[in-house]
Amino acid sequence: MSGVLWALIALPLAAGTVLLLCGRRADRAAAPAAVAVMLAALGLAVAAAYAGPAVSAPLLSGSPAELSVDGLSGLLAVTVTAVTTLVLAFSATEFGPRESRGRFFGLILLFAGSMLVTVTAATLPVLLMGWEVMGATSWALIGYWWRDPERVRAANTAFMTTRTADLGLYLAAGAALAANPSGSLALSDLSGAREPWRSLITAGLITAALGKSAQLPFSFWLSRAMVGPSPVSALLHSATMVIAGAYLLLRIDPLLEASGWGSSVVAWAGVVTAIALGLVAVAQTDLKQLLAASSCAQIGFMVLAAGVGGTTGGTLQLIAHAAAKSLLFLISGVWLTALGAKTLTGLYGAARRYRAVGVLFTVGALCLAGLPPLSLWAAKDVLLAAAFEEAPALYVAGLVAAVLSALYSAKALWFVWQPVPRAECVPDTEEPGTRHVPSRALPPLAVLALACVALSVPAFGPARAAVSRALDAADQPTPKIWEWLLSTAVALGAAGAAWIWGKRRVPLPTAFTRFFGSWLYLEQAAQLILVRPVLALAHAASRFDDRVLDAAVRGAGRGAVDLAHWSNRRLETGVAGSVSRVASASRSLGRLARRPQTGQLHHYLAQAVAALTVLALVFVFVK
């Protein structure tokens, strides 16, 4: 079955590359080709999840490139391919002929392929390769409308923030090599590294995972990424890329436990993010920003599950969140296209105007709120049961985050179900609306809504036990009856309170909306603490280069030129004169030497007699 795994990776990567190389020439065929490729990849993912293949190829001495599919990576591979297929099917109706469809669908396929490499990677080098390509394609997709400078800046912010956290992966890889220079870099072997390398590996992987999953303090990049197309938000920022960090933490659970501190750090990082970003979501007035903040908060539950060893609950939460949030992001795109609005006040009555879409949005929002019998309600209780076993404080904090989930979900529902203020259409607030929802966009949305209901089944009874066996997660805590009832009560109470609050039109406190509405001022803090000092240092280095190093180089050059001119005037003149005098003397001696050479025999005879006479006199006088 190794061929299945190779095909699963190669098919979207190859097809995406072809579409990108063809460019606009592939626009007409891009959408159906991409959907067909991902349908084939979905079939391969299901086959790989069932068979559990593993492949290896030479890469580094003592550490080959390895890919493998087990219970966790198999479920993730099926989730990634299924959600990508539905998003591509929806995008076929979203992107018109004026858009560069070949580039968009090619980038989506490349991203999906790199995500599949990431979830099936069994060694650090392969993980790094998939991680890097995933980051690069996400940057290109966020900045898809590259002619808009604001969108490009947002893509750069998202990319640079995640890249900063990604340095943790390089730290982890370097520490793993130092701990075992000639040994394996398999993820399953990292827990056996000796100290201090094990702690460095743990710290690096946690940092990279928190950055990619938009957990504190990196959460603000997800807010900036919302300028991308809605299908990109639905795929990257709810179902695939942002869950990659949570998946990695679930994968390295043995390392977190072996470190002695990693599990606690991860658990509290997740629950603090779930609460803080839940408050951010409550304060938002823009639907996509509300959904983005809720993604950070919901992924916080997955990170919490990784910290407390709740692999089953974390995985169920991950899959259920992928379905619910993809549905909500896609519907926000539908309403943006139809009404030209994404602010909550601009979406007054949107669900009433488009009833089918409104019902589907309601299913996704109620699932996000954690109301029974929908999937996130069931998954959240399974992971909170593991948190209760680990520390009751974590369980209480998780319940607080669940209350916030119900609040911001009910808030969004309240706005879209209110009567339209006037008999006319909702006014455009961002771009001209089409006043039309394509009928072909509804089937993918309906499938995602159905998944929000159906995915609650694996959280109960024999199905949950089967999931735990597939994940090799034995002895997972089971929620008790009172836990189910308590979570239901708090979710219903919070949702009801939010609805009543909206009916009374009571505004949130200004200080609350300013602080949490600005995403805790995280981006401003990053600018102040990191970006501005780095830019100031760069400007100082530039000035030092211009005024000191460059001036020194230019001064040395001018000095060399001046020395050359002086030597030309002084030394070269004397040397040239000496050479000229030697040459003149040589010419004079030559002329004198040529004078005896007359060619007359009697002259040569006279010269010989004279020379012999001189020699004879010399001998006489010397003696």
Image (cartoon, rainbow, N blue to C red):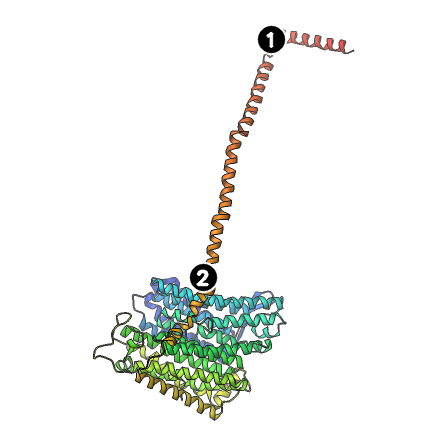
Judging by the rendered image, the residue that carries numbered circle 2 is 532
Determine whether 186 is above or below 535 in the image.
below
Secondary element type, mark 2: helix
Which quarter of the picture shows residue 172?
bottom right
Q: Quick one: label 2, few (<14), some, or many (20+) residues within 10 Å? A: few
Q: Image quadrant for the C terminus?
A: top right
Q: Residue 231 lies in what quarter of the image?
A: bottom left
Measured as percent of width and height from the top left, residue 459 is found at 46, 87
Does residue 66 appear in this view?
no
Image location (x, y in percent) of residue 167: 51, 66
What's the amino acid at mark 1?
Gln
Q: Regarding mark 1 in the picture, which secondary structure is present there?
A: loop
Quick check: 602 left or right of 392? right
Q: Residue at x 49, y 71 (%)?
A: 118
Mark 2 vs 1, N-terminal side:
2
**532 or 348, nearer to the observer:** 532
Q: Kindly identify which residue carries mark 1.
A: 600
For the image shown, how many numbered marks are present on the structure?
Answer: 2
Say if residue 521 shows up in the picture. yes
Identified at 47% across, 92% down, the residue is 482
Q: Residue 102: which numbered mark, if any?
A: none
Residue type pointed to by label 2: Arg
Where residue 412 appears, as percent x and y from the top left, is 34, 80
